[in-house]
Image (spheres, grey):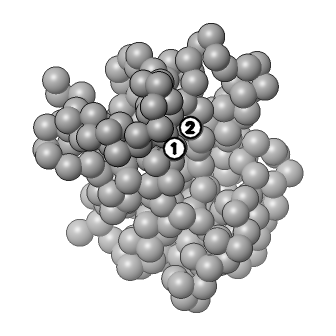
C-alpha cells in the first residue's frame, strides 16, 4: 500500500520536520527525492541520511530562479518529476495590529507565493510524466487547520493557509479541465511537535503575557481530543498516501490530520 516505486518527488522545506520525515517515508516507499530548503547544512545532512535515492538542492521558494534550478537539477539527476510537495512555510504568530507590512509580505511570499511558483514552474515536468503513469502525477500542498477554521491569535497565518486551501481546489479543477492528469490535494495538520510548533507555543505564551511555553503547550494539547499533539510522522504518512496511487480518485480534497481539533 502507498507504494511510490519509480516515482520522483520534489519536496520544499524538507531539511527538517514534516518535510524531512516525508522524504524519509517516500524513500522507504520506493521513490527518489529532491530535498529543497534554504537550510543548506541541515538539508545536506538530511539528504545524506536518506542514501543514494535523495539529493539536496538549495531552494528559496519565493524566487523563480531557485525553482528553475531545482527543477533542472532534479530532472537531470532522476529524469523527471512525478510528485510535488509544497511543504515550505513559516509561522508569524502576530495579530493584525501587531504585524508590520514587511512581516506580512514575508509570510505571503513563503506560504502563498511559494506554493504558486512551485505549482506553476513544476507543472510542465509533472504534466510530461503524467502521460506515462496510470494515475498521473500528484501535488500535495501543506495547509493547516488554520486554513479551515478561524483563529483568534493567528489571523494572518490563517489567511495564507486559507488561500492554500482554495488554491488547491481551484488548481485541481483547472488541471482536470485541461486534461493534465495531475491530482492536487491539501493536508491540514493540527499542532505538530516541530520547530514551527515550538514557535507556536512561544507566540501563544507572549499573547498570554508570559514566557511559559509549557503552559501554552498544555493549552494546545487540551484542544486535541485524541489526547496528544501530532508528530511529523503523522503528517508524512498522510502526504505519502495523497502522493500515491492509493489516492488516485482524490483531487481538490483536503485531508485533515488534527487529532480531532476541528471536530469540535
Dot 1: few (<14), some (14–19), or many (≥20) neighbours within 10 Å?
some
Q: Locate the C terminus by quadrant.
A: top left
Instruction: Estimate the x, y position of residue 69 in percent, counting from the top left.
Output: 81, 61
Outermost residue on the right side: it is: 65
Kind of element beneath mark 2: loop
Q: Is residue 3 left or right of residue 226?
A: right
Foreground mark, 2 or 1, reads: 1
Q: Nearer the viewer, residue 249 or 66?
A: 66
- In percent of the image, x 56 and y 18: which residue is there? 95
Instruction: Estimate the x, y position of residue 74 in percent, counting from the top left.
Output: 69, 69
Outermost residue on the bottom side: it is: 52
- In percent of the image, x 60 and y 85: which residue is there? 48
Kindly identify which residue carries mark 1: 199
Outermost residue on the top side: it is: 97
Q: Locate the N terminus by quadrant.
A: bottom left
Instruction: Estimate the x, y position of residue 207 in percent, counting from the top left.
Output: 47, 24
Residue 17 visible within the image: yes
* Mark sitting earlier along the chain (2/1): 2
- Looking at the picture, does residue 56 appear above or below residue 148? below
Instruction: Estimate the x, y position of residue 255 in percent, counting from the top left.
Output: 31, 40
- Tell me whether the residue at label 2 lies in contact with that at label 1, contact meaning CB atoms closer than 8 angstroms: yes
Query: What whole-number distance in Å separates the C-alpha atoms at marks 2 and 1?
Result: 7 Å
Q: Is residue 163 left or right of residue 242?
A: right
Kind of element beneath mark 1: helix
Q: Is residue 62 left or right of residue 98?
A: right
Dot 2: few (<14), some (14–19), or many (≥20) neighbours within 10 Å?
some
Kindly identify which residue carries mark 2: 91
- In percent of the image, x 35 and y 37: which residue is there? 216
Amino acid at each position: 500500500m502507498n507504494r511510490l516505486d519509480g516515482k520522483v518527488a520534489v519536496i520544499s522545506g524538507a531539511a527538517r520536520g514534516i518535510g524531512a520525515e516525508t522524504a524519509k517515508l517516500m524513500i522507504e516507499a520506493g521513490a527518489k527525492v529532491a530535498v529543497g530548503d534554504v537550510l543548506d547544512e541541515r538539508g545536506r545532512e538530511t539528504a545524506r541520511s536518506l542514501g543514494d535515492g535523495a539529493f539536496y538542492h538549495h531552494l528559496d521558494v519565493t524566487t523563480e530562479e531557485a525553482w528553475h534550478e531545482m527543477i533542472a537539477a532534479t530532472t537531470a539527476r532522476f529524469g523527471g518529476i512525478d510528485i510535488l510537495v509544497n511543504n515550505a512555510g513559516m509561522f508569524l504568530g502576530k495579530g493584525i495590529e501587531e504585524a508590520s507590512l514587511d512581516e506580512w509580505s514575508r509570510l505571503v511570499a513563503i506560504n502563498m507565493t511559494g506554493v504558486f511558483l512551485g505549482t506553476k514552474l513544476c507543472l510542465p515536468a509533472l504534466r510530461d510524466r503524467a502521460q506515462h503513469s496510470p494515475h498521473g502525477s500528484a501535488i500535495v500542498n501543506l495547509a493547516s487547520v488554520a486554513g479551515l477554521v478561524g483563529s483568534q491569535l493567528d489571523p494572518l497565518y490563517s489567511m495564507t493557509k486559507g488561500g492554500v486551501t482554495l488554491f488547491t481546489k481551484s488548481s485541481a479543477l483547472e488541471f482536470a479541465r485541461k486534461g493534465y492528469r495531475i491530482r492536487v490535494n491539501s493536508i491540514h495538520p493540527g499542532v505538530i511537535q516541530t520547530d514551527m510548533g515550538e514557535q507556536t507555543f512561544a507566540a501563544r505564551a507572549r499573547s498570554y503575557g508570559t514566557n511559559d511555553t509549557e503552559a501554552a503547550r498544555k493549552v494546545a494539547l487540551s484542544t486535541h481530543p485524541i489526547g496528544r499533539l501530532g508528530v511529523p510522522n503523522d503528517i508524512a504518512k498522510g502526504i505519502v498516501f495523497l502522493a500515491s496511487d492509493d489516492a488516485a480518485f482524490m483531487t481538490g480534497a483536503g485531508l485533515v490530520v488534527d487529532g480531532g481539533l476541528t471536530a469540535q
